[in-house]
Amino acid sequence: MRPGPLPVIRGLALAPLWFCQIATSAKSFRDNPILGSSILNAWGLHVSRRRLADAMARLRRAKLAEQIAPQERARFDQLGYFLRHDALDSEHFAALRREIRSARLPAREMRQGRTVTRRMGLDDQWLVRMPATRQVAKDPALRALVHYAASYSGEPTFAVQSILVGAFGGDEDPQTVLHSDTFHPTAKAWLFLDDVGADDGPFAYVPGSNQLTPQRLAWERGQSLTAARSADRMHSEGSFRATEADLVELGLPPPVSMTVPANTLIVADTSGFHRRTPSPNRSCRVELYATLRRSPFSPWTGGHSASLPPFAGRFNGLEMAFQEMLERTGVALGPWRPVGKTGAYESAKI
Ligand SMILES: [Fe+2]
């Protein structure tokens, strides 16, 4: 069937935007017909973006490398994550835990199947009342790990995050499926407030899946030919899902489930394959969480708008206000719902 005139007019109007997005972090195969074109991807569009992003990340990481101990850096390059037990001294960790347990902060929640993720953004106005938490968020050594994993310097976004798994309900949680967040390095960090057991939905990561090997490049090319038409929405939006058979094809080991004691810090490049291990029971995992994702193609590490006024120290609040404005005006409805001030260990509100 031939498309009617409206889709054609819309396509012509949006074509310049879709074209410009090639040079950005845009990743959706289903929303951008240029990025999703099986013809262009057969000619190498996706793998070219992947290769260029990888080359630029290597360049930037070389500039950030001296901030990390060589042994720790080599391990990250090999595995795709940093892991530190006893990340804080015991006194500092106890103070951090007290602060987070007693804090009531503005929160947003997102439901995915049985799982609700709650985030309480840690802007400077809240950190000023939480000195032990502030000390972690401003710690140059911790930031160096996040920077190296993201392959960028700049201002990570910090939050208290709770992963609340209910007993019943809903569809499958898409975070429990092995996936890569996007086609270029991006950092996520978790400092766990409590022990994380096998039934507490531990983070899992496929060691070595951060590396752009020839096998991975060939796999990425194969995915890019059909991703726009995938029935899995997140796969079609550029967060490629991987099966156990894919791992075998790629010569990768099974994921490692990070069952870890409290006060463990993990900083991962989540362009590697990872997931939240499914939790069979009700569970509550609370962590100090940080993330940093920037443009894939810049050769420079600096110049991050979130570290400049008016964003510095206020990013969470501004982002929440922007999202609410988009929803009020009917432009876009995001998955996150504001739930007012709440505590990290309270039950889900949505
Ligand atoms: Fe992810």
Image: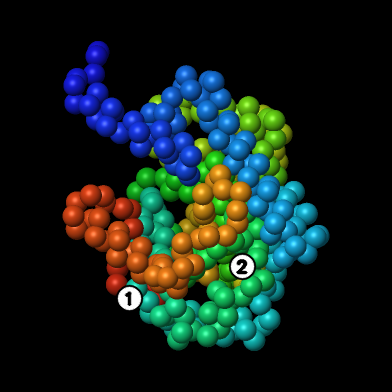
Q: Is residue 273 left or right of residue 286?
A: right
The three-letter amino acid code for the residue at tag 2 is Arg
The residue positioned 41% from the left and 28% from the top of the image is 34
Of labels 1 and 2, the one closer to you? 2
- Indicate whether 64 appears above or below 36: below
- Residue 143: mark: 2
Secondary structure beneath disc 2?
helix
Work out whether mark 1 precedes mark 2 in sequence or the reverse, and give the earlier one. 2
Mark 1 and ligand 1: say if the CB distance to the nearest ligand atom is below 8 Å: no
- Indicate whether 71 appears above or below 311: above
Secondary structure beneath disc 1?
strand
Inspect this view and state whether residue 66 appears: yes
Return the x and y of residue 164 as percentages of the image width and height. 43, 62
Mark count: 2
The residue positioned 63% from the left and 45% from the top of the image is 56
The three-letter amino acid code for the residue at tag 1 is Lys
Camera-side residue of 335 and 127: 127
Tell me the residue that label 1 is attached to: 341
Return the x and y of residue 268 as percentages of the image width and height. 62, 55
- Residue 141: mark: none
Residue 219 position by quadrant: top right
Quadrant holding the N terminus: top left
The residue positioned 72% from the left and 53% from the top of the image is 62
- Classify mark 2: residues with Cα within 10 Å, few (<14), some (14-19) or many (20+): many
